Image (cartoon, grey):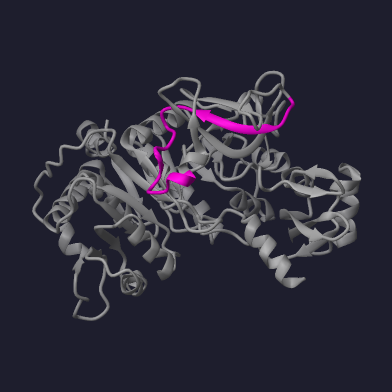
Amino acid sequence: MRVEEFLHNSARINGAKTALVAGGKRFTYAEFDAAAARLASSLAAGGIVRGDRVLVFMNNCWEAAVSLFAILKAGATAVPVNPSTKADKLAYMIGNCEAAGILTQGKLLPVVSEARTIEPRPLFVASTKFRGTNPAEGIADFETCLAATESSVKHQGIDVDLALLIYTSGSTGRPKGVMMTHRNVEAAATSITTYLENTADDIILNVLPLAFDYGLYQLLMAVKLGATIVLEASFAFPQAIFDRIREENVTGFPLVPTMAAMILQMRDLEPDFLPSLRYITNTAAALPPSHIARLRELFPRATVYSMYGLTECKRCTYLPPAELDCRPGSVGIAIPNTEAFVVDDNGQRVAPGVSGELVIRGPHVMQGYWRNDEATSKMLRPGPNPWEKVLYTGDLFRTDDEGFLYFVGRKDDIIKTRGEKVAPKEVETVLHSHPGIAEAVVIGLPDPVLGQAIAAIVVLSDPALTERDIIKHCAAHLEDFMVPRLIEFRDELPKTDTGKVSRRLAAETLEAAE
């Protein structure tokens, strides 16, 4: 099945149902499908054809949701781009994927114009609003495109065509475009909605960027099931999001650890203050067990799903909720229709308790990185069968005796100090267990004696906490070589565009301060 059929089928089955709530507007499935079809017709009239790459450069708004499905209805490949992306990076993406079009917002037109100056490609550009009366050359008005007479676009596409090209955050070098076919997307969406037990009755609130695959799949999965998606631009004002959850009777709330930390810092929240929530999910990075416990206290009716994934396959593992009490530090087992196992440097499976690299098999594994064979060959390697490639995640894991997986750290995050190997994640878990610490990230700094010295950047929820208090706490729970030598206090941690704490940026800021 192609992804645009998610929308068409849901509109056919229950067209009068609310599909999308965003920016003060509400769309039924019939309205959503019709708007995407009209925009697809305009894209085709503007020269977009099957296989073209078209960027969606917008924040979380109804126009972005319509744009994504319109691109797919036109037979093209959607390339969601974070609205905070700067012109030079946008220009790189435009040139790298040889984009044929951009759908954007008026407030972002200056960035688009600068990017087009850097990378002068003929593009179909549609903007939601113009400043002034004379739109720039080559730019069409989004509302005019949306008002086009609907005509079905005949693109002859099949499910092994590319549906999405999702650029990684670029934490190392230039961003890489992850290629996902329609078949990849359907497999991932089916697996995730199966273990989350999603139904058409779910109402999912998403504040995560649609350019972030975790946020994007909230939209895709909701539409696949005929559920309702509520889009909000950010989590900058948590109380406003809580109000929206109450207003819409939201049942599903996807989180990342930074959002969980913000919630847990709030002092005036009473347990069960959002009774409509059926489930809460977390990915991007593992939640500390202490945070999971506190979330369960605040949301006693909600099932908490601790998960692990990466853009290259969308989702890898989930912890069955019944296992939370006995395995709070685990990210669980492979998602349905997926195999996850741990291997050594020679690709051989390791015994329980032994750390190694996590490998993923399944129909949701990416096709590779767009026009980057070298990077692709490092991640996709021959599998157990001669016809397949499996995904080497670059993440270190171990299993327990029953096969449950535990994240140890990135292969390149391991700190070598005093001849010992230290996983930053282990130190961070101890830091997060202190009630006076809201967030923490641990890195290794060059040291002429130790090789690397362990440093921690922390955000406090208790301003009275001192460096000595934190080191004492760590010393009580960690081996001596794992105790941080340096504690740096910050108002916030450095993060990527998707809101994920960046260990690389943290290291750069500390090294610059040295």
Q: Which of 336 and 75 is in front in this view?
A: 75
Coordinates of residue 265 in the picture (x, y in percent): 68, 55
Coordinates of residue 298 in the picture (x, y in percent): 65, 42
**Is 140 left or right of 482, judged from the image as shown?**
left
The quarter of the image holding the C terminus is bottom right
The quarter of the image holding the N terminus is top left
Q: In this view, does 33 lie above or below 107?
A: above
Q: Splitting the image into 4 quarters, where does residue 189 fall?
A: top left
- Tell me if residue 265 can be seen: yes
Q: Splitting the image into 4 quarters, where does residue 218 fall?
A: top left
Coordinates of residue 350 in the picture (x, y in percent): 68, 24
Q: Splitting the image into 4 quarters, where does residue 507 fall?
A: bottom right
Residue found 79% across the figure and 48% down from its top:
416
Residue found 67% across the figure and 55% down from its top:
268
Q: Is residue 508 above or below residue 41?
A: below
- Tell me if residue 320 can be seen: no
**Is 453 left or right of 57, judged from the image as shown?**
right
Tally of marks? 0
- Provide the residue span drawn in magenta: 353-375
- Residue 200: in magenta span: no
Residue found 27% across the figure and 33% down from its top:
159
Coordinates of residue 493 in the picture (x, y in percent): 66, 61
